[in-house]
Amino acid sequence: MDFEELRQAIEEVMLVDAHAHNIVALDSSFPFINSFSEAAGDALSFAPHSLSFKRNLREVAELYGCENSLQVVEEHRRSSGLGSITVKCFKAARISAILIDDGLKLDKMHDIEWHKNFTPFVGRILRIERLAESILDKELLDGSTWTLDKFTETFMENLRSFADKIVGLKSVAAYRSGLEINTNVTTKDAEEGLAEVLCAGKPVRITNKSFIDYIFTHSLEVALQFDLPMQIHTGFGDKDLDLRLSNPLHLRMLLEDERFSKCHIVLLHASYPFSKEASYLASVYPQVYLDFGLAVPKLSVHGMISSLKELLELAPMNKVMFSTDGYAFPETYYLGAKKTREIIFSVLHDACCDGDVTVDEAIEAAKDILARNAIKLYKINIGAKVFNSKDIVSANSVNIGNSASDNGVSLVRILWVDASGQHRCRVVPIKRFNDVVKKNGIGLTFASMAMTSSVDGPADETNLTGVGEIRLMPDLTTIRRIPWMEVEEMVLADMHLRPGEAWEYCPREALRRVSKVLKDEFNLVMNAGFENEFVLLKSVAKEGKEEWLPIDSAPYCSASGYDSAAPIFHEVVAALQLLNIIVEQLHAEAGKGQFEMALGHTACTCSADNLVFAREVIRAIARKHGLLATFVPKYALDDIGSGSHVHISLWQNGENVFMASGSSYRHGISTVGEEFMAGVLHHLPSILAFTAPVPNSYDRIQPNTWSGAYQCWGKENREAPIRTACPPGIKDGLVSNFEIKSFDGCANPYLGLAAILAAGIDGLRRHLSLPEPVDTNPSYLDAKLKRLPKSLSESLEALKKDDVLEDLIGKKLMIAIKGVRKAEIEYDSKNKDSYKQLIHRY
């Protein structure tokens, strides 16, 4: 069977989250560790040792592109801001509607209205016990004591007044007195129960069983009158709950009561560990529906799959619904959505293999479970288009008010990187950014992705002209206060044809597309870490003309060289820390006025973002000191060139799987690592058209300059274009990553990494093997080794023959890239000194 269509359908459907709770402010006293566990008190100290905790923390760290530790994730949350992380989580979750039970009271929780900034539809679920308690907490106007009659009248009036403002009711009777609801509770028992509740004092907490049953039964009358579903907590929860009393089989009296046979009863949390019992009830009682939030993602993978399979053993698939049971933290929404897609695919895949359903039936079942069942039951109006992420407003474009930026900010820079690798920006006032740009973006000509390093106009043969316009959509997960200009913010932009629909020429989207292929086909994530080499230049007047000369001539790794720029580096490192970008080390390089700064590795999409921000920081702070920082590959033809070496590793479930885990592997590299790296080595000539994108790049890639001039690889061989690395802390003989040296500062990092990814995927698909490593200077083997392209013309020719890269990166984008490269070649052939002007562009 071909399950790709099923997988695609599950990935594309926009989810309807039928049960969740409010998100809290970053400074809430509710601890973030509770996003991974229902435990409390001393029991919480054991939570990090559970399977689900380890998995969920790792997946959040991968989402944020940070180290897999609770402390680092919490620091990332604080530095990014709640608006930014909520947008990131909701965008990744792809949720079109959320139904929120706001009866779970948490410190500094945001109201329901706030959540509407992040998803197209937010509905309210009214918790009946909380409503009753809020009523009894108030004094009667005449000073008298509450009686059952007065309470009932007030309670029913309140319920009815909310009926047109909510999508359903909810009961937590399981937490208070258990699920054996007596729908025939007597007035006498209810009165005695109310008296007991009032005697306990305020704030009121209702635990008396008779009074709980009374409230529940009267609520069902309103639910029946207004056709509102009643959600019921069943199964596990925190320790306040007596699990023995939360078995849904206790609901038999309620389910057998003819008065309420038309009430829709939703059993929450897969009723775990009573999933089979819940499945049975849904199969024999027409009014019973099932919701599996909390069980996914709080259980182990085996537990989640088993629980959902048990629900589907008997229950009709059009009565089973998804929810995240998200609460307090946007990460809980993301984890619930992510794991649900994976678990649904696994369960339906097995059902197809077992012969229970066909693939077409499984696709329909997935759409029902993930969205349609809830839309129908809760009467949600979100329009007809809910099954494809392109049909819903992107989370990038929601208006999050002042949560992402205000507080003295006057202007916002919207940044993008074009096909020639140049950083560009538009600047808008903060009010327009909040009122218009967040939702609608900024207009930009098609020609913006066809410009070269020499001409700010569209190159021929790119199929892009000044006709047509896209929208630059700010990715709010990347919005940052500018450290050197605190009245401004900067944000990276995606290119959309219209808000919510990515433009196929968008470099950031291209990298996401190829990353998704690696994840979907091989369950791998590519991490990347960049080494930035650059030259600091000072302005000198010479014969009445301005010239830019290096600030010093100090040798490699000299203290005097570092001292010459130390004040700048203190500011640069501090600024990068404020941007949550890790600096691993820096030093003076071998060229005149040349320095290197190594950044920490992270998921490749985040690493590219970090590189763009780092370049902006270095250039801006140098400018502040009256200097010009340039990343040009070969500033002076008689000096050492500057690269942007990138270190690549492969990760799976938070673990580095590029590195070998046993003695049976070759070269200290795992099988997937070798196949991936072999693909990169195989395609390296055409990759250079992305990573060495201007003619000046090839002045740098020369033998005996540590830039990698031959198509080979070596172990810790800095003359090879691909070097396997065993950094400090890695066991001898093992390789944690490989370095690509033929990557420079003129490259668009998104396109360069996308090309590397595409080549690696080809290696994995074809199970390519590495040749033997070169353990000497490759130039000594000139007759045996193939020279890498000596010019942009040669790498462009290689690219034209490379169907693999075109298939994965996209034909139209490839046409534009080839057109830009051809224009670079033609301009350079007619203007041999054109490279001297590149310092003002890179």
Image: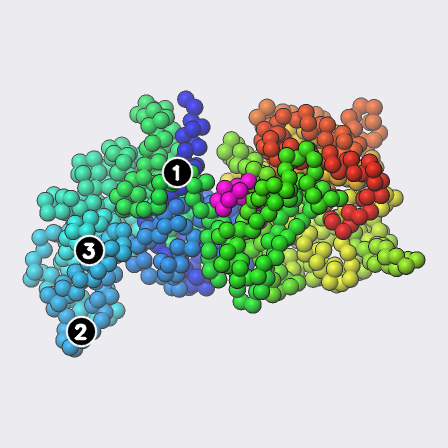
Percent coordinates x, y for residue 157 in the rendering: 17, 62
- In the rendered image, the residue lying farthest to the right is 543
* Callout 2 secondary element: loop
**Does the magenta run of residues contain 479?**
no
Work out whether mark 3 precedes mark 1 in sequence or the reverse, and give the earlier one: 3
Q: CA distance from mark 3 to mark 2?
A: 27 Å
Work out whether mark 1 precedes mark 2 in sequence or the reverse, and give the earlier one: 2
Q: Which mark is residue 177?
A: 3
Work out whether mark 3 precedes mark 2 in sequence or the reverse, and give the earlier one: 2
According to the picture, the residue beneath numbered tag 1 turns out to be 387
Mark 3 Cα shell of 10 Å, populated few (<14), some (14-19), many (≥20): many
**Does the magenta run of residues contain 494?**
yes
Q: In this rendering, does residue 87 appear at all?
A: no
> Which residues, given as a range, are shown in magenta?
493-503
Q: Which mark is residue 140?
A: 2
User: Of the residues shown, which amino acid type is indicated by label 3?
Assistant: Ser
* Callout 3 secondary element: loop
Residue depth check, mark 3 versus mark 2: number of the one nearer the observer: 2
Percent coordinates x, y for residue 517 in the rendering: 53, 33
> 557 and 13: which one is in front?
13
